[in-house]
Image (tube, helix red, strand yellow):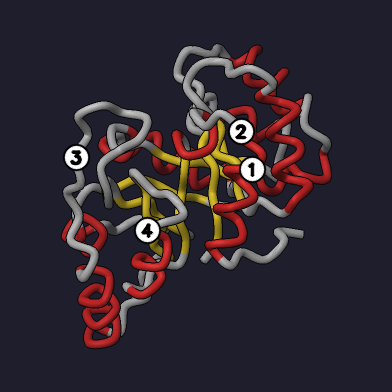
Amino acid sequence: MDLYLITPPEANKDELSLARHFLEQGLQKLHIRKPFYNEGELRQYIMSIPPVFHARLVLHSAFRLVNEFPSIGIHLRGGDRQNPALVEQVRQMRPTSLSTSFHAWEEIVAEETTYDYVFISPVFDSISKQGYKAGIDLAGRGRLMQWSLQHKKQLPRVVALGGINVTNLELLNENGFEGVAVLGAVWESDNPVAAFNALFRASGSQAGF
């Protein structure tokens, strides 16, 4: 499974140096989710990361920065998908990857826009969001694959999100998830480097070069 890392919403101690380190170690995607950052702050964040890794960065806001950094991907939030004009604008930008988030298997089936991969959550009780309880039937991944075959419709790669740690990764692998996305398991750890390394090994990820 591929390993994706979502940034904390607010600046975390040593975040940028850690992000660069994780990318150097082979992190597939770093999702830059900074709801309180303006466009200028996001630009500085991107510029602090060596260009060789930009193809593995994904923006959750300030999408027009893709015009300045064309190798970066875009992630649409659920609310973004309700704005057809925005979705079309983003598609015209031709980001290197386009992803979004869902909270039910039926939403993936019903979606008409083509995505490279999608997050589905919460698969387990969230680490970073108190009270955000598991709400996804893991067996639904297998049913989704069967539906795809029966209807001859190609669906995006599915990345599990929510409450993921080294002890439950194997269960997600057994259920056919192509990737896992983490936030609290790394950034809220006493030792983010050790936490990332353990998750990277447990996921069986390959270096993202």
Which callout, 3 or 2, points at the residue further toward the start of the chain? Answer: 3
Callout 3 secondary element = loop
Labels 3 and 4 touching (C-beta < 8 A): no
The answer to whether 105 appears left or right of 13 in the picture is left
What's the amino acid at mark 4? Answer: Asn
Q: CA distance from mark 1 to mark 3?
A: 26 Å
Crowding around mark 2 (Cα neighbors within 10 Å: few <14, some 14 to 19, many 20+) is few
Q: Residue at x 19, y 40 (%)?
A: 133
Pointer 3 residue: 133
Which dot marks residue 194?
A: 1
**Mark 2, residue position:** 191
Percent across and percent down for residue 164 are: 39, 49
Instruction: Say which amino acid is labelled 2.
Output: Asn
Labels 3, 2: front one: 2
Q: Is residue 117 above or below residue 94?
A: below
Secondary structure category for the residue under label 1: helix
